[in-house]
Structures are given as structure tokens and as C-alpha cells.
């Protein structure tokens, strides 16, 4: 009996220890949830305030645009673009664009450290961009705002690397949950897209932040679905056969959106004008589009609801789907600040609505409501652009509170994700990082080695020999330096060949060749080289591809400046890993 009491005591101490270990993080997550929840509230009120300043009305743009003169529609996006260009160029350049890739990069490469001013600049820049007429959404900014709040708290309290990343995820989940009144989707967004970690240590704080922020949002804005969902029940299995087709269509539109966005960013980068003027010109173009198609203004929820309730012509929806891709890409590439999540919902609703009208025309008795395809395609576009089908399924479910769409939604989202990921190497978030040379799919090893340049790890005194040296001098140099390779240089110091022990085998047995051959005669002249500015990861891949243990480093003039050895790369990697592990224990 006493032994049982001792065992019970040890078990209780173990449980108590685990509870005490996680309690500080849960309290911090609660604080992040409160601040991010109120940050979301402030952000939404800021958008309304900006819209009142520019249009003297805070309701949906479609309800009052026809009462405005043409200049009152064209000028606000132009002025707003100029102000946003000023804020981002002078305040925080990372606040430009849709924000989520910057958060992902901070988590992967900077241990979740985000500059403290980013949240403030992002609120101002995105509120002005959306409120003045920019064709972007709210979710990207609120993710960056919430993540910035979580990162700032972590930096202030000097938490370890793991907890710092978790707090950033808590802020992102809280922001998404509060903005869309979707706590489960907020949790999955943070875990599936940002952290890639479903463990208890990350899951519990993220859940607490998401629930807290949602409660705050519901207190101010109420608890009701964001969209009017059409009534739908599966009548037959034949209906489900149409949704895989919708998944394919969603994937193709998603890939088109991603490609257009980054192609337009490339074109915008070629225009060498001040950022303020570039953003103003982008806003001017958006204003011109608004004159003919006011539906593309801002987040576009009004137009989405019209498509869901079958109150929009199929031709108009088809035009708006492609026009929204262009308008959102133009807003972001010219220097605007806003998200791509709401535009993805918009594009999905329009292309799905047009598809719904087509199948309703062919099968009027089987498909009673075309609007259901608009609703399901919203999830398909989100899944195809983000490669996050679980988040897409849950957020559409929470935005509509319609359980009957789950089966077609799952079919469409999974097929869209599968096909889009097969066509494009990255999602709309990771593609931006891939273009910067950051590949999150490679894990920690890829990102650690990408921070090193060849010049950081190379030896600046390589074992080299003049290419005209005699064979005897080659043997003597190998004996003296005890080196596996000798690099041959010409009279100008340019690399001309490499000699290894394998190259000496054919001449070792013939002593008469000593005076007939020179070093270059037995050297390998087809040489793999790297430069000092090359990334070490690429050099390591080249070593593996050619089964060699070191590479000569040459300058722009072809002269030998050093050698990069595999053992030095691995030593640097091990040192970085140990450093990360030590920071995690602090």
C-alpha cells in the first residue's frame, strides 16, 4: 500500500510538472489572442473609416456606387495607392503585398522574429488600400498583424525559438479566426500553412488564441455566417460526378491566378519609377476598372453573395473571374497592401457560378440551384492557390454554416489541390519565397545551408601547382602537401585543370615518362567550379552529383581564389544545428 502511494505521488508530480511547463505558453497565447482579436477589430473599423473618408459611405460598394460621379470613383484608389506606396516604402517594405509569405519566411529563417513596426504599418497601409478601392482582401494583412503581435510579445519576453514560432502561429490563427468568425479554420491555417506542426505543444496555444480572438470578434460584430448559403442536398450520385470537374476547373483558375500575380510583379519591377508614383498609377487603373465593373472593389463579398443566390448573369460572372485575377495582381504588383484569400473566394464564386449555370442548362432537373457550384468552387480556388485543402474545406464550412456541402466540397478541394500542385511548383504563398531562393519544402537543412555563401566557408589557400610542372614535381607536391587534389593554374593564375591520385595511376609504373609529361598532360580539364557568391547548398548538390569532395572557387576573371570542401560544409551545418538546439533550451 505504501508503495502504491509512492507511485501515485510520482505520477502526480509528473503530471504537475507537465502542466507547469505548458502553463506560461498558454497564458502568453491567451494574451496574443486578446491583442490580435482587438487588432482585428481595429483593422475592420479602420477599413470602414477609410471608406467613409473616400466615399462618405461604409456599406458595400455595390449599394451606392451608382450615386457617385466618375471622378469620385477613379480618384480614391489613386490617392489611396500613393499613400500606401509612401507608407510601405518609408515605414516597412515587408508590409507591401499580401503578407503571408513574409510571415512564413520569418518562421522558417528568422525563428519567428518580425519587426515590431510591421503590425502598425500593415494596419494603416492595408486599411487605406482596401477602403479606398484596392482589389485585395483582409486575411493577409490580419495574418501579418496578428503574427507581428505574437512575435513582438515573444521578443519582449525573450522566449526560446520554438515558443517564438508558436506565438507567431497563435497571432495568425487569432487574426484569421476573428476576421472570418472561423475559429477552426484559423487554427488549421496556422498549423497547416505556417507552422506545419500539429503537436500538442503548438496545438493547445493556437487553439486558445483562436477561441479568444473569435469571442472578441463576435462581441463586436455578432455571430452569423459571412455568406448567404444556398440550400442544397444531394439528390443523386450523378450530382457528385460533376464536382471533380469543378475541381479541375478550380485548379486551372488557381494556377492562372498564381502565374498572373507573379508575372505582373516581374513587369512592375521593370518599371523604374518611385514606389509612390507606381502605386498611384496602379490605383488609377483600378479606378478605371471600377467605373465599368464595381464588383471587383475591395473584398467583394457583395458580389459573392449575388453569385451564391443566382442573381448574376453567367457572362458577367465569367468576365469578373478573369478581371478579378487581373485587378488583384495589379493592386499588389504596383505596391498595394492586402490579401489574396478573399480574391480567391471571389474568383471561385464567379467561375463556379458560371459553371453552375452551364450544368443547370444541360441538366435542369438534376441541378436545381447553380449557386451551390459557386459556393463549392470558392473552396476549390482557396485549396488550389494555398495547397491547404483542410483549411479550405473548414473555412468554407464555417463561413456558411452549411454541413450539406461537405462531400462535394471535399471532392473539389482535394482534386484542385492535387492538380494545382502537380502543375505549379509552389502555392501562391510559397511561390514568392521560391523566387527569393527559399524552399520551405526542403526543411531545416535546406534553409540552414542557404544562409551560407561559398566565400564564407572556402579555404583561401588552395593546393595549387603551375600547369607546366614536371611529373616529378607533381609527385613531390602530393607528398609534401598530403592533399587529395592539386589545382593547376596557368601563368596568369587562371584555373586550367585538376590532378587527383586517380590521374597518377597510369603513369606510376613508367619511370621514363618523368621527363616527357608535364602536369597538364595528366590533369582533368573538364572542371566543375563555383564562385564566392554562390549559395553553399547548390555547391553541395553539385559535389553529390559528380561524386567529388571539394570544388575549386574561381573569381569572375577565372583565377583560382580558394577551395570549398565537403567536410567544411558539414561542419558548418552541424554547428548551426547545435546553436539552434541550444537556443531552444534557453
Image (spheres, grey):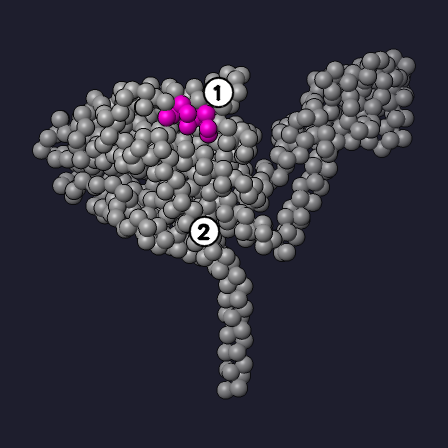
| Circle 1 or circle 2, nearest the eye | 1
Say what secondary structure mark 2 lies in.
Answer: helix
The residue at 23%/43% (across/down) is 405
The residue at 87%/17% (across/down) is 469
The front one of 129 and 229 is: 129
State the residue position of label 2: 35
Q: Position of residue 307 (x, y in %)?
A: 21, 32
Q: Is residue 447 left or right of residue 323?
A: right
State the residue position of label 1: 277
Q: Quadrant of residue 465?
A: top right
Q: What secondary structure characterizes most of the magenta part?
A: helix
Q: Quadrant of the C terminus?
A: bottom right
The front one of 518 and 154 is: 154
Q: How many marks?
A: 2
The front one of 171 and 262 is: 171
Q: Earlier in the sequence, mark 1 or mark 2?
A: 2
Q: Position of residue 66 (x, y in %)?
A: 23, 25
Q: Quadrant of residue 532?
A: top right
Q: Quadrant of residue 34?
A: bottom left
**Residue at the left extreme?**
365
The residue at 23%/36% (across/down) is 305
Q: Residue 200: tell me if it is visible.
A: no
Q: Is residue 532 left or right of residue 259?
A: right
Task: Please rate how many residues cluster around mark 2, counting C-alpha atoms within 10 Å: few if below 14, some from 14 to 19, many from 20.
Answer: many
| Mark identifier at residue 349 | none
- Residue range in magenta is 76-84
Q: Position of residue 180 (x, y in %)?
A: 33, 44
Q: Position of residue 373 (x, y in %)?
A: 22, 34
Q: Is residue 134 magenta?
A: no
Amino acid at each position: 500500500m505504501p508503495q502504491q502511494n509512492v507511485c501515485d505521488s510520482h505520477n502526480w508530480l509528473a503530471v504537475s510538472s507537465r502542466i507547469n511547463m505548458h502553463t506560461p505558453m498558454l497564458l502568453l497565447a491567451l494574451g496574443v489572442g486578446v491583442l490580435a482579436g482587438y487588432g482585428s477589430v481595429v483593422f475592420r473599423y479602420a477599413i470602414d473609416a477609410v471608406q467613409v473618408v473616400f466615399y462618405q459611405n461604409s456599406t458595400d460598394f455595390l449599394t451606392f456606387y451608382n450615386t457617385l460621379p466618375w471622378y469620385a470613383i477613379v480618384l480614391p484608389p489613386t490617392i489611396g495607392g500613393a499613400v500606401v506606396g509612401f507608407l510601405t516604402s518609408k515605414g516597412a517594405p515587408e508590409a507591401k503585398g499580401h503578407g503571408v509569405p513574409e510571415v512564413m519566411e520569418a518562421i522558417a529563417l528568422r525563428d519567428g522574429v518580425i519587426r515590431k513596426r510591421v503590425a502598425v504599418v500593415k494596419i494603416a497601409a492595408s486599411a487605406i488600400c482596401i477602403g479606398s478601392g484596392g482589389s485585395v482582401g483582409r486575411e493577409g494583412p490580419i495574418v501579418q498583424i496578428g503574427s507581428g503581435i505574437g512575435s513582438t510579445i515573444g521578443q519582449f519576453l525573450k522566449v526560446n525559438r520554438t515558443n517564438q514560432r508558436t506565438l507567431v502561429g497563435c497571432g495568425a490563427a487569432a487574426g484569421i479566426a476573428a476576421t472570418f468568425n472561423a475559429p477552426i479554420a484559423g487554427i488549421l491555417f496556422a498549423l497547416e500553412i505556417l507552422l506545419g506542426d500539429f503537436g500538442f505543444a503548438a496545438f493547445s496555444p493556437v487553439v486558445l488564441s483562436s477561441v479568444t480572438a473569435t469571442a472578441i470578434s463576435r462581441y463586436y460584430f455578432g455571430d452569423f455566417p459571412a455568406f448567404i448559403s444556398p440550400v442544397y442536398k444531394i439528390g443523386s450520385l450523378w450530382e457528385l460526378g460533376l464536382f471533380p470537374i469543378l475541381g479541375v476547373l478550380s485548379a486551372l483558375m488557381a494556377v492562372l491566378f498564381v502565374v498572373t500575380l507573379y508575372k505582373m510583379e516581374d513587369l512592375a519591377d521593370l518599371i523604374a519609377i518611385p514606389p509612390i508614383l507606381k502605386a498611384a498609377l496602379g490605383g488609377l487603373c483600378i479606378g478605371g476598372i471600377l467605373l465599368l465593373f464595381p464588383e471587383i472593389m475591395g473584398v467583394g463579398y457583395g458580389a459573392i453573395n449575388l453569385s451564391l443566390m443566382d442573381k448574376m448573369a453567367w457572362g458577367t460572372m465569367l468576365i469578373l473571374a478573369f478581371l478579378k485575377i487581373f485587378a488583384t495582381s495589379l493592386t499588389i504588383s504596383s505596391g498595394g497592401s492586402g490579401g489574396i484569400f478573399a480574391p480567391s473566394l471571389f474568383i471561385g464564386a464567379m467561375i463556379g457560378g458560371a459553371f453552375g449555370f452551364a450544368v443547370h442548362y444541360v441538366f435542369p432537373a438534376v441541378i436545381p440551384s447553380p449557386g451551390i457550384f459557386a459556393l463549392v468552387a470558392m473552396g476549390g480556388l482557396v485549396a488550389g492557390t494555398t495547397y491547404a485543402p483542410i483549411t479550405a474545406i473548414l473555412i468554407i464550412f464555417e463561413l456558411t454554416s452549411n454541413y450539406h456541402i461537405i462531400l462535394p466540397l471535399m471532392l473539389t478541394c482535394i482534386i484542385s489541390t492535387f492538380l494545382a500542385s502537380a502543375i505549379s511548383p509552389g502555392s501562391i504563398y510559397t511561390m514568392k519565397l521560391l523566387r527569393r531562393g527559399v524552399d520551405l519544402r526542403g526543411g531545416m537543412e535546406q534553409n540552414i545551408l542557404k544562409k551560407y555563401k561559398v566565400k564564407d566557408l572556402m579555404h583561401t589557400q588552395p593546393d595549387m601547382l603551375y600547369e607546366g610542372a614536371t611529373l616529378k614535381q607533381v609527385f613531390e607536391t602530393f607528398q609534401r602537401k598530403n592533399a587529395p587534389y592539386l589545382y593547376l593554374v596557368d601563368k596568369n593564375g587562371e584555373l586550367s585543370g585538376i590532378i587527383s591520385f586517380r590521374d597518377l595511376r597510369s603513369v606510376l609504373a613508367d619511370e621514363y615518362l618523368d621527363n616527357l609529361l608535364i602536369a597538364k598532360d595528366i590533369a582533368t580539364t573538364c572542371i566543375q567550379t563555383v564562385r564566392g557568391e554562390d549559395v553553399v547548398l547548390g555547391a553541395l548538390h553539385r559535389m553529390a552529383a559528380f561524386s567529388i569532395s571539394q570544388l575549386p572557387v574561381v573569381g569572375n576573371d577565372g583565377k583560382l581564389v580558394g577551395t570549398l570542401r565537403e567536410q567544411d560544409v558539414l561542419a558548418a551545418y552541424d554547428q548551426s544545428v547545435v546553436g539552434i538546439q541550444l537556443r531552444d533550451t534557453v
